Image (cartoon, rainbow, N blue to C red):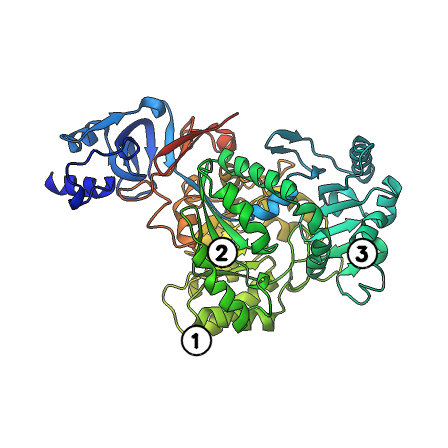
């Protein structure tokens, strides 16, 4: 008992010099009984109560057992979760708050339905229906000189799009159609003029088709610089970021990783990130992981590394830079620009590199030798092969026992690559929503039935012992960990087709992939990811036990809200 009181005093922030001082009310002990507490801890998988003090977990176990531990300690019992199920706070270890912030204020014209903060969007497919929806949105803006920005267009669902098509919608209003992948945009003539882009100014660029108004992959930064006055306008960006905060909370998430922090210019983003994500209203923390390509110079050179090494000076309680960095291999999965090994794409087109293999290797080596954990965007099996070759070289040159190099997205990979990842000690943070959104379409176009069925081979990775987590890459998927887990468990597409059932995750594996295994991929497993004494008191509060419902209903379990560092945050529906 004496040891317990000492630990309690530390947890409450009482020091020797302050003996006898009253503990402030917000530092008191709260005991939460629950219908069930799912801990993600092997030693105690389930409990029926948890005690919290000073933002951390003080005790987990039976209600009577915790009360006995608390004898002689002042505490209060809060029955708010008596009929609820507590899980560790969900973790999304790869999304982009700033990217989502510029997209959320746009008009969503998407192949599938979306539930967004403040509105719901009905999906639309087919070229004529897409253009009709676009004309409808343009008509709604008549009387204003606002630009029309839309997000969600996909050529495989909506048909080919050209500058002429957009000019037919409006020859005077600037129109930007942002591709579902985020890696491409289409602009009408009015937008090109407003952007200051001419045929001569972009002549020879490999990823710009001026006649079609099409910018993609490495051309996106150029287009973005011209669009920044619109989409980084403080009112646009701030309102979008507030919507992102709402979406993250609604998904039951208490920790996120911004997996390209500063992607649009950190000095521009930072005041808004501080105002919104570092606010007392924000019930989650953000791990800030910079992209090596976003800080000037050549990725991995001395100048860019010096800037990145200085970023932790900005750290606060909810926004923290750590010694981890983001690198990029091949192109976007939604654009079918990932790099594929033979036989390649069925229609003969080629993928793209975001960083050529030689540059990827040199940048990875620089950060590896400087002690950074590497997070590498990799979508196709050829891109993955290059990443694994680089990792193998680095391990031979400078061996590391706990490098935790993490491959992100992993749209299509092979069985042998699962085995190789395990041998090299690699981790994977995958986006299972790829299968849901694109499995049916890629069966018809580009990949064929066999490869499309094996999109995101989650079950294979786990069987080979590769630590696996799931992410949304919001807005590439909804920031809804239960939906991501549902896809991984059921392997069901938007059309209702089950694909490669041998690659399914079990329910437990899927829930671990959005809690403790997601924490492990960003080196936060000692702080979050499970409900254990000493960890942050972060909980996702559900209306039902996910282990007790049918697997097909997992994504439909209502979320009451979250507890972040001991403070309940119910959803405002």
Tag 3's secondary structure?
loop
Residue under numbered circle 1? 396
Q: Are marks 1 and 3 in contact (CB under 8 Å)?
A: no
- Badge 1 density bin: few <14, some 14–19, many ≥20, Cα 10 Å: few
Foreground mark, 1 or 2, reads: 2
Residue 263, image x and y in percent?
Answer: 59, 55
Residue displayed at 77% across by 50% down: 186
- Badge 3 density bin: few <14, some 14–19, many ≥20, Cα 10 Å: few
Quarter of image, res 373: bottom left
Residue displayed at 54% across by 66% down: 387
Residue 564, image x and y in percent?
Answer: 39, 37
User: Earlier along the polypeptide chain: callout 1 or callout 2?
Assistant: 2
Give the farthest residue toward the bottom: 397
Which quarter of the figure is the N terminus placed in?
Answer: top left
- Badge 2 density bin: few <14, some 14–19, many ≥20, Cα 10 Å: many
Work out how far the residue at label 3 is from the one at label 2, CA to CA, in angstroms: 33 Å
Foreground mark, 3 or 2, reads: 3
Work out how far the residue at label 1 is from the one at label 2, CA to CA, in angstroms: 26 Å
Q: Can residue 469 be seen in the rendering of this structure?
A: yes
Q: Is residue 499 left or right of residue 89?
A: right
User: Earlier along the polypeptide chain: callout 3 or callout 2?
Assistant: 3
Whether residue 263 is situated above or below residue 569 in the rendered picture: below
Residue under numbered circle 3? 196
Residue displayed at 42% across by 27% down: 544
Residue 378, image x and y in percent?
Answer: 57, 59
Whether residue 569 is situated above or below residue 2 in the rendered picture: above
The foreground one among 62 and 208 is: 208
Q: Can residue 431 be seen in the rendering of this structure?
A: no
Residue under numbered circle 2? 289
The foreground one among 264 and 449 is: 264
Q: Are marks 3 and 2 in contact (CB under 8 Å)?
A: no
């Amino acid at each position: 008992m004496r040891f317990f009181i000492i630990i309690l005093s530390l947890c409450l922030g009482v020091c020797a010099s302050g003996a006898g001082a009253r503990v402030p009310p917000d530092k008191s002990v709260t005991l939460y009984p629950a219908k069930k507490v799912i801990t993600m801890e092997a030693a105690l998988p389930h409990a029926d109560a948890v005690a919290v003090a000073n933002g951390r977990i003080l005790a987990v176990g039976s209600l009577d057992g915790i009360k006995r531990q608390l004898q002689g300690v002042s505490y209060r019992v809060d029955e708010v979760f008596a009929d609820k199920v507590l899980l560790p706070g969900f973790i999304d270890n790869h999304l982009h708050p700033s990217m989502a912030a510029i997209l959320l204020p746009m008009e969503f014209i998407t192949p599938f339905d979306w539930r967004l903060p403040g509105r719901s969007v009905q999906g639309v497919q087919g070229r004529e229906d897409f253009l009709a929806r676009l004309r409808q949105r343009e008509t709604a803006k008549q009387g204003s000189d606002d630009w029309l920005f839309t997000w969600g267009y996909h050529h495989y669902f909506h048909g080919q799009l050209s500058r002429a098509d957009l000019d037919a919608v409006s020859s005077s209003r600037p129109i930007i159609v942002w591709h579902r992948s985020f890696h491409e945009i289409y602009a009408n003539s009015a937008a090109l003029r407003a952007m200051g882009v001419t045929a001569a100014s972009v002549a020879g660029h490999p990823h710009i088709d001026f006649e079609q108004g099409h910018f993609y992959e490495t051309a996106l930064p150029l287009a973005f610089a011209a669009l920044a006055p619109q989409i980084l306008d403080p009112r646009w960006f701030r309102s979008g970021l507030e919507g992102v905060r709402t979406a993250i909370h609604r998904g039951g998430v208490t920790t996120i990783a911004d997996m390209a922090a500063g992607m649009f210019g950190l000095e521009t983003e930072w005041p808004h990130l501080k105002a919104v994500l570092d606010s007392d209203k924000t019930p989650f923390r953000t791990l800030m992981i910079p992209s090596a390509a976003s800080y000037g110079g050549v990725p991995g050179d001395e100048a860019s590394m010096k800037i990145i090494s200085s970023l932790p000076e900005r750290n606060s309680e909810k926004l923290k830079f750590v010694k981890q960095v983001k690198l990029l291999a091949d192109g976007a999965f939604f654009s079918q620009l990932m790099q594929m090994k033979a036989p390649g794409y069925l229609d003969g087109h080629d993928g793209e590199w975001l960083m050529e293999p030689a540059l990827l290797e040199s940048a990875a080596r620089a950060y590896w030798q400087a002690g950074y954990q590497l997070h590498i965007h990799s979508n196709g099996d050829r891109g993955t092969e290059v990443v694994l070759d680089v990792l193998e070289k680095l391990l031979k040159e400078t061996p590391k026992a706990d490098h935790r190099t993490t491959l992100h997205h992993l749209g299509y990979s092979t069985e042998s690559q699962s085995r190789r990842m395990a041998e090299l000690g690699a981790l994977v943070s995958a986006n299972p929503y790829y299968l849901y959104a694109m499995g049916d379409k890629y069966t018809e176009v580009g990949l064929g039935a066999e490869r499309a069925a094996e999109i995101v081979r989650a079950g294979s990775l786990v069987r080979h012992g590769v630590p696996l987590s799931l992410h949304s890459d919001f807005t590439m998927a909804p920031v809804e960990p239960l939906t991501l887990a549902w896809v991984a468990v059921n392997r069901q597409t938007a059309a209702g087709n089950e694909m490669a059932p041998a690659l399914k995750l079990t329910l437990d594996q899927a829930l671990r992939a959005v809690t403790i295994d997601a924490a492990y991929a960003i080196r936060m497993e000692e702080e979050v990811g499970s409900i254990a004494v000493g960890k942050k008191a972060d909980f996702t509060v559900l209306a039902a036990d996910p282990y007790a419902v049918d697997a097909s209903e997992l994504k439909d379990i209502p979320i009451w809200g979250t507890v972040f560092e001991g403070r309940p945050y119910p959803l405002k529906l």
